[in-house]
Image (spheres, rainbow, N blue to C red):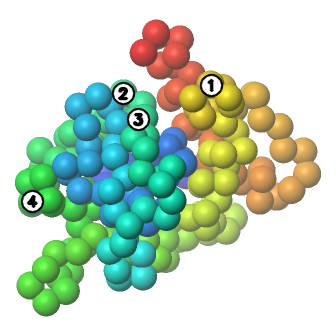
Amino acid sequence: MEARLAGQDRTIFRLLSRTGLRAGELFGLQWQDVNSNQTVSIQRTFSKGEIGPPKTKASAKPVALPKALYAELIALQKAAVDPSPTGWVFPSSKKRGKDVMPIASENWLKRVLKPVAALLGFAVTLHMFRRGFATGSSDFGGMPQGADAVDYPGCARQRRSRLLLQAGAADWASERAAGH
């Protein structure tokens, strides 16, 4: 699925599949939330057209990023229309009045992810990324041990989550092997 996405859409997909972020947390990111220690800080959410606080206190903790994904975010910032600290990491192409707002997760799902998933023969939701990440996480910092550490013999939804998790687990496993 990832191979069928490009640019910003691929980065969004990679963030969802590799971090366990809620969609609202991801689309609520501003450049000031991308930290030099290869983490993102969750300061707000963007859901149903509204900016709000993180869902829980635990949600506000920094979230580690694989090195390659952090580099993608830095490259996006360099090319961003508004790379200022309060600029949205994933701004909508349409303004609300004079304000630029983030991409709406529901629109991204409908316009980008669902068509790609349909071409591959399965349905997708944004929640399956978080569930897939959580299911495949180990006790080692909440990072996947690798796709082989998780086995989903029955449920079709879990098998789809495993497919999404495999790419993210490979990133984390290669970084652990390299000592990052």
Query: For the residue marked with disc 3, what is the amino acid?
Result: Leu
Query: For the residue marked with disc 4, what is the amino acid?
Result: Asp
Q: Nearer the viewer, residue 68 or 179?
A: 179
The answer to which of marks 4 and 1 sits earlier in the sequence is 4
Query: For the residue marked with disc 2, what is the amino acid?
Result: Lys
According to the picture, the residue beneath numbered tag 1 turns out to be 140
Query: For the residue marked with disc 1, what is the amino acid?
Result: Phe
Residue 34 x %, y %:
26, 43
Say above or below: 53 vs 135: below
Q: CA distance from mark 4 to mark 2?
A: 23 Å
Foreground: disc 4 or disc 1? 1
- Label 2: which secondary element: helix
Say above or below: 4 vs 115: above
Q: Is the C-beta separation of discs 4 and 3 under 8 Å?
A: no
Callout 1 crowding tier (Cα within 10 Å): few <14, some 14–19, many ≥20: few
Instruction: Residue lying at the far bottom in this picture: please name it.
Output: 97
Residue 69 x %, y %:
36, 37
- Label 1: which secondary element: loop
Mark sitting on residue 67: 2
Callout 3 crowding tier (Cα within 10 Å): few <14, some 14–19, many ≥20: many
- Label 4: which secondary element: loop
Residue 135 x %, y %:
72, 44
According to the picture, the residue beneath numbered tag 4 turns out to be 82
Q: Is the C-beta separation of discs 2 and 3 under 8 Å?
A: yes
